[in-house]
Image (cartoon, rainbow, N blue to C red):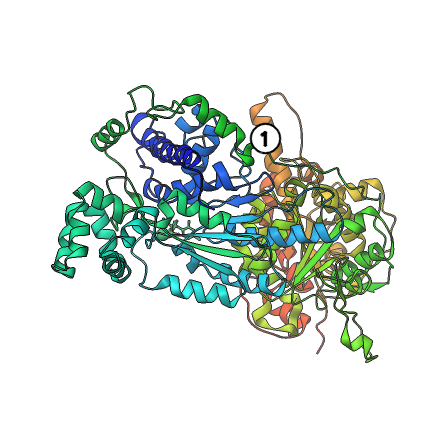
Amino acid sequence: MPIEPARLELLTALAQKVLWLSSWTIHHANHIRPNTDGLKVGGHQASSASLANIMSALYFSVLRPQDRVAVKPHASPVFHAIQYLFGHQTRDKLENFRGFKGAQSYPSRTKDADDVDFSTGSVGLGVAQTLFASLVQDYVMAHGWMKDRPEGRMIALVGDAEMDEGNIFEALLEGWKHGLRNAWWVVDYNRQSLDAVVREGLWAKFESMFRNFGWDVRIVKYGTLMQQAFAEPGGEALKRWIDNCPNQMYAALCFQGGAAFRKHLQDDIGDQGPVTQLIDRRSDDELLALMSNLGGHDMASMIDAFESIDHDRPVCFIAYTIKGVGLPFQGHKDNHAGLMTVAQMEKWRGAQNIRPGHEWEKFEGLSQDPTKLDAFLADAPFNREGRRRLGAPVIDVPERLAFKPAPQMSTQQGFGLVLNELARGDSELASRIVTASPDVTVSTNLGAWVNRRGLFARAEKADLFRSEKIPSTFNWEFSPSGQHIELGIAEMNLFILASALGLSHQINGERLLPVVTLYDPFIERGLDALNYACYQDARFMVVATPSGITLAPEGGAHQSIATPLIGMAQDGLASFEPAFVGELAVIMNFGFRHMQGESGEGGSVYLRLSTRTIEQPQRLMSADLQNGIAEGAYWLRAPGPNAEVIVAYAGAVAPEAIEATGFIGESRRDVGLLAITSADRLHAGWTAARALRRHRRGVQHLSHVEKLLAPLPRDCGIVTVIDGHPATLGWLGSVRGHRVEALGVERFGQTGTIPDLYRAHGIDANAIIDAAESLTSGAPVLHRKMAV
Ligand SMILES: Cc1ncc(C[n+]2csc(CCOP(=O)(O)OP(=O)(O)O)c2C)c(N)n1
Ligand SMILES: [Mg+2]
């Protein structure tokens, strides 16, 4: 049904206002309150203009409060302008666009104040986030938690060059496997990227690809003016010319204007009667208005395209647009960083009847009745329920997580045991855990959990092996109540799913506790998505196993060296590398609480685990010990008052550290053994304490690591050892000025047994003893005898 003319008029006026406000925001940041040390704001003006109309159509008319949107990074000023019109964004933040605490350059859930649904910035990730957010909504619904909340659509506004990002294709395939619904992707088909003009015919590739994955594809190419012109005599010839015009040429002509279009049309078409008259009837300005009236810039066409969708299948809209439309550099291939000059802005301001000093007024320059515009905004369906960020109560975490102990275990095995115990029980905690793994469910020890809790799918699917009574260790049954999400191998998908699951409390008002597993080295494969998930403050637990060179014969290509440093450096992620299963249970317990902590306090959790079976200490978990484990370290053997050297280790090398400490203790005094469970938390606590002391003079607060190392004499040496990069623990010497020998792994790729590899990389007991010797004086230390 065509949109009512009165409504169309108001929407069109508001879209023009959005274009003005977003451009003025950028202009302001560059020319009026420059806040970037002379660095110009590039990449926004042209890229924003491209989407001003489409986003106005969505936000002012089509979206409902339950819908969520990932806005293309460079359309951030458009988003902020829309929220400003709704009254959710302040003028001060717009004036301070890109400045400290101002409106963010790219929409940010955590840093912006105007209700951003999904952060964007690293292109491709926000797009995939909408797909996984939709799957998570299905999960919440299938588990009966939607109550009477209506289903929302998850919408991405996608740059056409953004589609180059591989993670989008990975997500598409996963979406197809899971029967994706309620997702709309709107491709801003301006045929320009940052550097250049895109390849001819790209839309056809998009179209067939999306159709292939079961999506509905809607191409919105011609605006109303164009459609009317096509219906005139000669219109067919004009349409043919538009369709055949190469992208570069069309863009160049849009830049040059109506006269240039006229000349080209005349040269190409010649004198052909009706079409020539059609062109001649229009002035240069009218001709330019006609030729730039692509579907994406035509309110009626966009509203019609959106409103004609009457199903919940995923839809891809390919909306033709012009980058920088309406601005002096529209269509120019260099326009990504293009900015209007002061003179150009003055001219444009005049053309829109905006008086100097009134630039921020909501309806300045519009001829429509302000009360009508106000009422229209107040009545926009999207805006009816105000802010749409939901919350959910904290799920109780029991005092202790149980597991069935064994004298010898690996942390990976322990992880499976803890989850198995949770799966056996009927706690609220267990019911809110969702697991996922990129095709390594069984090999990361999630098998027992999945056996008990089942796989998630909207429709039941029996395990054929089971129904045929073929013996199999694993029950692979899908149902709407299942709690494991089976994923293909792509690690990017794993982290974006974790991001979507980990935001469920705010998006769906229902808390989920995602636990996702993968092989440690492949964290690097999904790292940008992991970073993205953390940036959005999504909450999840990453369990990475096996790790390091300790995975030994599993393969050199699977060894990880940098991940402990990634774990330390990643904001929003608390990283742990326990050696023993008892520690792991304490850490998981801490983790489930940490995942539910307030913004700024809680965060996500990364556990770097191992397949190495080692002897488990039998000990009582005192409150002190638990605290030490969660804070990052405790003395496994306390140093004496005259300690000459201590050994500080993390993770799977515990047996080597323990053995070496025994040897060293025979000829060096008071040797201590420091068990480090989290280099990350230890270091973060130290930095925070220093900052506190700096900012509040007189405060005596000491961090955990400072307290631990306080009893050591000044000339005591520290040997650190980890199956990972030595820098992970090398900083320990700086805490109180001790000399350090930092052992670790700096090369990778060679397979072998654990003893072979530990010896080759210098993290075995003898390497630790050598390091201790080099830090101390006295008689040679007895070494471990090598097996022959
Ligand atoms: C992962 C990543 N790589 C590179 C960039 C830098 N970058 C920002 S926008 C852009 C191209 C944008 O083209 P398109 O998606 O077509 O959007 P348009 O500017 O045309 O609106 C690039 C390369 C980025 N933001 N993220
Ligand atoms: Mg583009």
Residue 339 or 397: which is nearer the viewer? 339
Query: Where, by quadrant of the figure, is residue 384 drawn?
Result: top right
Residue positioned 81% across, 80% down in the render: 470
Instruction: Judge from the rendering whether residue 65 lies leftward or rightward of residue 236; answer left or right.
Output: right
Which of the image's four quarters has the C terminus? bottom right
Query: Where, by quadrant of the figure, is residue 509 drawn?
Result: top right
Farthest front residue? 233
Secondary structure type for disc 1? loop
Residue 469 or 542: which is nearer the viewer? 469
Residue positioned 48% across, 48% down in the render: 306
Query: Where, by quadrant of the figure, is residue 117 drawn?
Result: top right
581 w.r.t. 599: above or below: below
Q: Is mark 1 within 8 Å of ligand 1?
A: no
Disc 1 residue type (three-letter): Gly
Q: Position of residue 453 (x, y in %)?
A: 80, 60
Query: Is residue 777 among what the camera can see?
Result: no
Label 1: which residue? Answer: 386
Q: How many marks?
A: 1
Q: Position of residue 247 (x, y in %)?
A: 27, 58
Instruction: Judge from the rendering whether residue 582 lies leftward or rightward of residue 508; answer left or right.
Output: right
Instruction: Judge from the rendering whether residue 213 lies leftward or rightward of residue 343; answer left or right.
Output: right
Instruction: Judge from the rendering whether residue 38 lies leftward or rightward of residue 419; answer left or right.
Output: left
Query: Is residue 365 among what the camera can see?
Result: yes
Residue 92 or 380: which is nearer the viewer? 380
691 w.r.t. 732: above or below: above
Q: Position of residue 524 (x, y in %)?
A: 54, 59
Q: Position of residue 638 (x, y in %)?
A: 77, 45
Graded by Cα atoms within 10 Å as few (under 14), some (14 to 19) or many (20 or more), the crowding at tag 1 reads few
26 w.r.t. 744: above or below: above
